[in-house]
Amino acid sequence: MAIRYELLKTCHQTGARLGRLHTPHGIVETPAFMPVGTLATVKAMSPEELEEMDAQIILSNTYHLFLRPGHEVVAAAGGLHRFMHWNRPILTDSGGFQVFSLSKLRHITEDGVTFRSHISGEPLFIGPEKAMEIQNALGSDIIMAFDECAPYPAEREYVETSLERTTRWAERCLKAHKRPDEQALFGIVQGGVYRDLRERSARSLTALDFPGYAIGGLSVGEPKEIMYDVLEYTVPLLPDTKPRYLMGVGSPDALVEGAVRGIDMFDCVLPTRIARNGTTMTSRGRLVVRNAKYARDFSPLDPACDCYTCRNYTRAYIRHLIKSDEILGLRLTTYHNLYFLLRLMENVRQAIREDRLRNFRDEFFAQYYGQNS
Ligand SMILES: Nc1nc(=O)c2cc3nc(NCCN4CCCCC4)[nH]c3cc2[nH]1
């Protein structure tokens, strides 16, 4: 078995669970947040800094690495872990979502998706078999089925046709996957915001007995309340002995609300992306450090944070760096934002251990969202 999920405890106050995901590159305590390293690097962070802040697992992208440098180059380096000098677990997304969010002139057929590279413009193709070939070559510990993430909003019949094809693609992925003992293939539940379609997708995929399940098709512009509704009726359809991964979700409220509803794994570019324009996450809410009001503020980004950035630098200095486009500026804000979310997930795990996640959520939200409202 490539991975083993150990269910340690279910929170009595909520549907949250404490787990341990055993992978060939180490153990992931769940619920866990996965920093996104799309191009084989978590932007502005070194692997040593990610280890220092206790990032347990990171995400990388099939689509991007297929285009550049090419999965054959990564394979020749000995795989993604060797290539990027990261020896903890890696999860790779399968490319479906990225083709739609990045490339032009894409065209879906039963075979897969033809598109033009957003870098060179050359015509390319990815389908289930190609997505497996690329991820097998990358050597990530967890790989994702090739799917279509239906847009939001989308007509019911579009979502239905799409989920039926995604299920057929999932079966083709299972057949094409060459290394099931070393790399765990997760199925991805689709179905948009239609309850009966979500149930159909979940039932079809659980019948195929994947080692883990992702909930896709969310965090694509739908209101958060709708996302939480979809989780309420989709998560219970997934086996509780296997990990559940909510794709593309990473704001503090959505991480806590997702954990409350039984999600074990999350990923999002949010913390690293907003850091690069000087927006930081603090225990008292978002702080846009480039704002003039911090020009002479010699306190840390977050007085309640003990990260490298908050122990050694001030808002005034970080603001100066960001305004001056100094590389150290975005490194410091990135370090802090990732540290903040990783600590948040640690606090969520502790709250589950103590059966008080609902209380924790209320206290955290009052601090994070209260002051700014
Ligand atoms: N294979 C696959 N299938 C999905 O349905 C999927 C659904 C997703 N939904 C998101 N949302 C990302 C939202 N993100 C928020 C911060 C700014 C950039 C976009 N990422 C996703 C990735 C996905 N990957």
Image (spheres, helix red, strand yellow):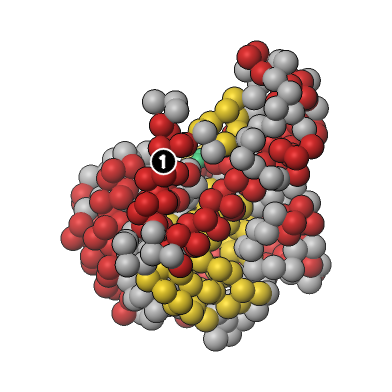
Q: What residue is drawn where x is 46% and y is 37%?
A: 367
Judging depth in this view, the residue of 373 and 142 nearest the camera is 373
Q: Secondary structure at mark 1?
A: helix
Q: Residue under circle 1?
A: 365
Q: Is residue 97 left or right of residue 299?
A: left
Classify 10 Å Cα crowding around label 1: few (below 14), some (14-19), many (20 and above): some
Q: Position of residue 96 (x, y in %)?
A: 48, 55
* Quarter location, residue 206: bottom left
Residue at figure coordinates x 64%, y 63% from the top left = 56
Image coordinates for residue 372, horizontal then vertical, percent: 44, 26
Q: Specify whether residue 360 is in view.
A: yes
- Residue 131 rendering spot, x and y as whole percentages: 55, 65
Can you see residue 219?
Answer: no
- Residue 88 or residue 311, whichever sits in front: 311
* 119 lies left or right of 228: right
Rendered-image quadrant of the C terminus:
top left
Query: Ligand 1 closer than 8 Å to the CB at disc 1?
Result: no
Q: Is residue 304 left or right of residue 188?
A: right
Decide: is 373 above or below 22.
above
Residue type highlighted by circle 1: Phe
Q: Position of residue 363 (x, y in %)?
A: 41, 44
Residue at image point 45% right, 44% down: 364
Residue 172's place in the image compared with 118, above or below, is below
The quadrant where residue 21 appears:
bottom right
In the drawing, does residue 296 fall left or right of residue 240? right
Number of marks in the rendered image: 1
Residue under the image location 71 percent in, 38 percent down:
310
Q: Residue furthest left?
A: 196
- Report which quarter residue 163 is drawn in: bottom left
Which quadrant holds the N terminus? bottom right
